[in-house]
Image (cartoon, rainbow, N blue to C red):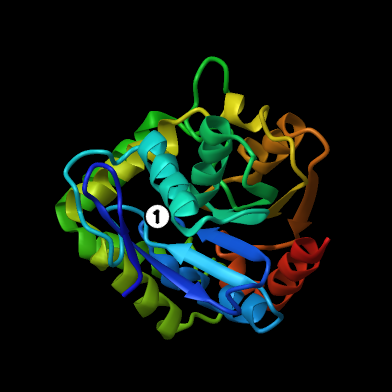
Amino acid sequence: MNTITTRDGTTIYFKDWGPKNGPVVTFSHGWPLSADAWDPQMFHLASHGFRCIAHDRRGHGRSSQPWDGNHMDQYADDLAELFEKLDLRQVTMVGHSTGGGEVARFIGRHGTRRVARAVLMGAVPPIMLRTEANPGGLPIEVFDGFRKAYLQDRSQFFLEVASGPFFNFNRPGAKASQGLIQSWWMQGMMSGHKNAYDCIQAFSETDFTGDLRKFDVPTLILHGDDDQIVPIDASARLAAKLVKGSVLKIYPGGSHSLGDTSRETLNQDLLTFAKS
C-alpha cells in the first residue's frame, strides 16, 4: 500500500492513479468516508492524463486511528506532509464536504505555493454552525443529535444517512441504489470510532472564513441546490462571496453527493476546470 508516516507517527494511506508525469489533482473526501468515495472521478481524470491522488484522512479508511489530532488544523497539516513527501506542485485541489474544509484550511495554513486551482464541492465552509456572526447556520442541536445517534448505534446511523439525505434517496420518486448505500456504510464503518466522532465537531464548528479570504488561485465552487447535508444558502453562496474571483456552479436538484448522483456532469466539470 502507498503510505506516508506523519511527524506524529500517524500512517496516512493514499491512492496514486494515472501517469506519474501528468498534472496533479488531489481529492479530499467527506465524513466519514475514505478515498474510495472519489474512485469515479479519479478514474475519469486519470484516463485523461492526470495524476490523481486521494488520501484517507487520519482515522478514516486505511489510515491509522490516532486518539488525538482529529481536527482541521491537523488534517491540513497531514495533507501538507503528503504534498511535501511526494513533491506535488501546481496541484488542482478538490474537496467534498469535510474535505472542502480540509482544502480551505490547507490554503489558510500553508498557502498556495504548491496549488494551482481549488474546487469546493458540497463543502462545509465557511462554517456550518449557527453563531452570532453566522445566523443562517444550523443550530448546535442538529450536531448534538448526530453525536447522540452515533453513540447509540453508529452502524444504524450510518445506514440511515446513506439511505436517505446523503444521496437524496428520501426524495419522492428517487430510485435508491443499494450498492451506493452499502458502499457508504462500509466506508463509514472503516473509520475509527473516536476519530469519526471527533470529526463531527471539526466539520460543524470550524470557522473557515479567514481561510477562504486567503484563496488566491482560480476556484470553482460546486453545490447542489437540494443538498440536505450542507444547505447551499449557508455554505456555497457565502463561500463564493469570500473567495475573490471564484465561480459558483449550482446543480439544480443536486444532492450532497454530486460525485454519484450527478457523476457525468461533475466529471466533465472537473476535467474542464483542471485543464484550464
Quadrant position of the N terminus in the picture: bottom left
Q: How many tags in the picture?
A: 1
Location of residue 233 in the rendering, given as x and y in whole percent from the top left corner? 67, 39
Taking depth in this image into account, of 140 and 210 the one nearest to the observer is 210
Asked whether, in this view, residue 202 is left or right of residue 96, the answer is: left
Q: Let me know if residue 174 appears in the view.
A: no
Q: Let me know if residue 118 appears in the view.
A: yes
Q: Residue at x 68, y 36 (%)?
A: 239
Few, some or many C-alpha atoms within 10 Å of disc 1 (few <14, some 14-19, many ≥20)? Answer: some
Location of residue 112 in the rendering, given as x and y in whole percent from the top left corner? 64, 40
Residue 190 lies in quadrant? bottom left
Asked whether, in this view, residue 190 is left or right of residue 254, the answer is: left
Location of residue 6 in the rendering, given as x and y in whole percent from the top left corner? 30, 48
Asked whether, in this view, residue 207 is left or right of residue 202, the answer is: right
Tell me: residue 225, above or below residue 211: below
Identify the secondary structure beneath mark 1.
loop
Taking depth in this image into account, of 30 and 156 the one nearest to the observer is 30
Residue 252 lies in quadrant? bottom right
For badge 1, the amino acid type reads: Trp
Residue that carries the numbered disc 1 in the rendered image = 31
Location of residue 211 in the rendering, given as x and y in whole percent from the top left corner? 59, 30
Taking depth in this image into account, of 20 and 179 the one nearest to the observer is 20
Quadrant position of the C terminus in the picture: bottom right
Q: Residue at x 69, y 73 (%)?
A: 267
Tell me: residue 271, above or below residue 112: below
Taking depth in this image into account, of 131 and 17 the one nearest to the observer is 17
Q: Residue at x 38, y 77 (%)?
A: 183
Q: Residue at x 69, y 35 (%)?
A: 215
